[in-house]
Image (cartoon, grey):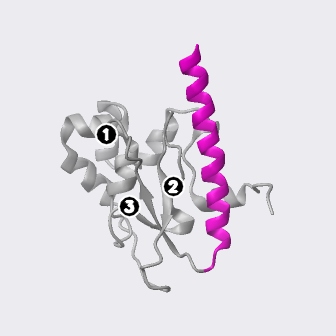
Amino acid sequence: MRYHAARIAQTELHRAYAERQAVELMDDRDVEFVQWRMSATHPRVDICDYFAQVDRYGLGPGVYPKALAPIAPAHPFCRCTLAPRLDIAPGTRYLENPQAGHAWLTQQGLTAGAQVMGSRARLQQALSGADPVSLWNAMRDPQYHIKTVDQVERDGWPVR
């Protein structure tokens, strides 16, 4: 019982922190890009590795235009965060490569790819062209879907 209570408490506290951080990032005009940073205590390969290692925008692994960045937690006990990338020049142009995630999953192989996606069936769907994040969200309660920074802002976080 204590384990489940700790899991819920820690995960929801981190969710509140990450959503507040998302609002602050959207309000900060100096920040245009962020990077998904995995916690040093991350125990195994999962969707966090996907967010941290895929170069979807040609800005580097795990780097996103701030509005398009996913926010943590991606799973129970997730401690990943978004870090502002002030070293990338303002106005840097980027081009989205929607196939970057599929290419990365292919490189991971069957075992690690299935760990990232949650099952071999979902891995096969992703490799067949389905969006990995949509597949990840489909197996979760809508309350726990992975959102992007701009979705938190649109949802009207009650701060300021």
The tag earlier along the polypeptide, 2 or 1, is 1
Q: Quadrant of the N terminus?
A: top right
Looking at the rendered image, the disc whose residue lies closer to the viewer, 2 or 1, is: 1
The magenta span reads 1-29
Q: Residue 62 carries which label?
A: 3
Left or right: 95 as drawn, with respect to 73: left
Q: Distance between the residues labelled 3 and 1?
A: 15 Å
When asked about the image quadrant of residue 29, the answer is: bottom right
Q: Name the residue under label 2.
A: 70
Q: Name the residue under label 1.
A: 45
Compared to residue 67, the image places residue 151 above or below, namely above
Across and down, in percent, residue 31 comes to 55, 75
Q: What element carries label 1?
A: loop
Q: What residue type is labelled 1?
A: Val
Q: Tell whether position 22 is magenta.
A: yes
The tag earlier along the polypeptide, 2 or 3, is 3
Across and down, in percent, residue 3 comes to 53, 19
Compared to residue 133, the image places residue 122 above or below, namely above
Residue 24 vs residue 67, the one in the foreground = 24
Q: What residue type is labelled 3?
A: Gly
Q: Which amino acid does label 2 sit on?
A: Pro
